Amino acid sequence: MLELTAEAFKEKITNKLKTDRGIEIGDASDKDIYYVIAAIVNEEIMPQWYDTQKKYEEKNNKQIFYLSMEFLVGNLLQSNLLNCGMLDVSNQALKELGLDPENIYAKEHDAALGNGGLGRLAACFLDSLASLNYAGHGYGIRYRYGLFEQRIINGNQVELPDYWLKNDYPWETKKEDEAVCIHFHGDVHMFKKNDGTLEFNYENTDKVMAIPYDIPIIGYENKVINTLRLWSAEAVYDEQETLATENNEFYHDLDHKHSIEQISGFLYPDDSNHEGKELRLKQQYFLVSSSIQHIIKNFKKNNHTSLRRLPEKVVIQINDTHPSLAIPELMRILMDEENFSWNAAWEVTTKVIAYTNHTTLSEALETWPKGMLEHLLPRIYMIIDEINERFCKGIWYDHEALRDTIPSLAIIADDQVHMARLAIVGSFSVNGVARIHTEILKKQEMKHFYNLFPDRFNNKTNGITHRRWLLQANPNLASLITDVIGPQWIKRPKQLISLLKYSKDSSLLEKFDQVKHENKKILANHIYERTGILVDDQSIFDVQIKRLHEYKRQLLNIFHIIYLYNELKVNPNQDITPRTFIFGAKAAPSYHLAKEVIKLINTVASIVNYDPDIRGKLKVIFLENYNVSLAEKIIPAADISEQISTASKEASGTGNMKLMMNGALTVGTLDGANIEINDLVGNQNMFIFGLTADEVMDYYQHGGFDATAIYNTDDRVKRILDQLNQGEFGSHDIEFKDIYYNILYHNDPYFVLKDFEPYIETHEIVERTYRDRLTWLNMSVTNIAHSGKFSSDRTIREYATDIWKVKQVWG
Ligand code: Z57
């Protein structure tokens, strides 16, 4: 649609307002305009969507199915316009109509069907799959409530329901005819057939309908439209139930209906923390069973051959262990419905399933009580049990040296089903998400499995879509880059490297400075509108935006702020470069310490921001309800990117990549993908500090370090902890005692005190560097230049060639 003019686009808007919504432009609200523009996009892409799917059918190549409990897609209007080539014309048309495009696009409610990194990664992957023309589809759950909306009240996080579907969602299409039936509970009966093989029947199961809602995933200027299919749970309609009302069972039926609809009721809000609730297990099986049933139906429709050839046409990537029941579910269908033998079914399953691991944190590793699994999914449990028996026997007989380790490898052990073990045993590929993370999996967490299956393990360093996170979120930077090196980087992000040639050109560096400053003014305005606080757009914007977790160490950041505050109180005339610390973070509702840290940040903010001694040199801003839309506002304006996890704990991180791509400099530990950023830009272009992963793991093996010793010897640390303990930052003296106790009596499990001094010193270097404008700008441009590697296009190409063995479909 590149030939569409603004004039024609305006006409489309006015016509559609009339025909779709029955109003004249003068009476239209921003929301009306939003819906009309979404309709214009849909009109453009619907035929392309059909054509893409037809082509996939005709070519009948292998297709990728990305199964994930989370897809954090965020807002879609702007990125859909961008990808189908209508963003510029839409912006122009809206401006000519006297409207602010930003306001119109902001009318969309974010689809927050994810918690953080893992869910956002899935969304970036979909964007890259479509943009690179791979036949790859997402399968997830259409949660009626997405991740909670966060409000800060008296400094505390308060959670509100995110009913994102309250207004029409213009991007989804319900596909009633493709509904499938899912079975829970029931009794399994086993028969011996004439040929001596076993047959399994199920009776008295609870039936749930899975109704698909399809969302188009638009490739960048290539007319490829892939599908994100989200399943919604509905009660099975049968006539008896409607008749039951005569017997006064109406409320019983309603209750039943509601409990079924709960399966797709809400997204569990715990990031990197396994809660073990039965409803969550139901959700996982619901996703897996509906997706696999559909995949098999589709295979049969397009291939008139045996399902033994499924691996030639289908690869299923499971996003963490959350969909790992895909393994026994595929076994079940092949054996019980398609009459495969165990061995034949296993052969197919282990060639179709590939597993991505996203963490080594023990609290995130999924285990389910075997009783719970057996009760909810009796047949699935039998299959897992058999997988386990065969696997353990195999070790016992074939790997004598590993006999002692069987308890730590067994899929079922201590009455728990260990999902990561199931995922490794039942798949042909196990990948980590950054080099160091994969190495830790191979050498530590999963070393016995690695010894058993060395070829299965591989690394795929994460990436982000540069289309959303640079082109769309930071249009001024994108067009400056294009002015300097031409537009090739948009399709080939690695070409950003051409910027290096200009990274010492001071007149050009000025322009990058101007763009950053413009973005900072925009964010400052936004902060003022949302909080009433004025921030200095000349100050350093120091940003930490991510889920709140102890290992991510927002606490270290706030300790630094308290330290600076204490110093300024002693010496208000100190000549420091003003700083604005910006936080965005949601805590899991049940995560007490994380919520205490949010409270601490807000409390420190309320003191620092209004203390006249500070004279505006420090501002602390906690922006509530951090989500994709807010990230798009903050990232273009960041000077400093805080990536300060306890080394070895952050599998990869992806915010680090987004901020780097937008010219922020990283203050970070040698953890996750920070290490790979550091490989590219070098120590001279980022601020690395703190313990290494090896040192951290060493301490853990030898009982940690002595936190109290640091408290007793470092006056700065002692001061801060005493302030927390004595209620200096709170109205009651009990506030923040939990943080104090956690550090001193639980021996600072995330090494906040150990890394405090190097962190403080690093920030002193940051400040000196910031004052040296040309050096800073050179560093910033160098980071942008190297960020092309972290496009998810690169990541997806690696998955495609190494794991999936698929090629681009055409073009
Ligand atoms: C999640 O967002 C991540 C890991 C998990 O196990 C769960 Br559950 C949720 C994150 C990691 O913490 C990040 O380091 C990583 O970048 C991201 O997944 C994507 O791989």
Image (cartoon, rainbow, N blue to C red):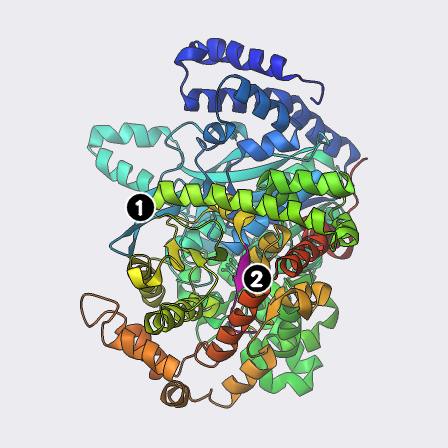
- Stretch of the chain drawn in magenta: 639-647
Task: Work out whether 543 lies above or below 400.
Answer: above
Name the residue type under label 2: Arg
Disc count in the image?
2
The crowd level at tag 2 (other Cα within 10 Å; few <14, some 14-19, many 20+) is: few
Residue at the spot of label 2: 771
Q: Is residue 221 magenta?
A: no
- Between the residue at mark 2 and the residue at mark 1, the CA separation in whole angstroms equals 42 Å
Residue 363 at x, y percent in the picture: 45, 69
Name the residue type under label 1: Leu
Residue 377 at x, y percent in the picture: 45, 55
User: Would residue 793 appear left or right of 612 to someone viewing this image?
Assistant: right
Residue 396 at x, y percent in the picture: 64, 81
Residue at the spot of label 1: 160
Residue at disc 2, secondary structure = helix
Residue in the image at 58% along x and 54% along y: 659
Residue in the image at 53% along x and 48% along y: 637
Dot placed on the residue nearer the N-terminal end, 2 or 1: 1
Quadrant placement of the N terminus: top right
Determine if residue 748 is in view. yes
Residue at disc 1, secondary structure = strand
Give the number of the disc on residue 417. none
The residue at the far front in this view is: 573
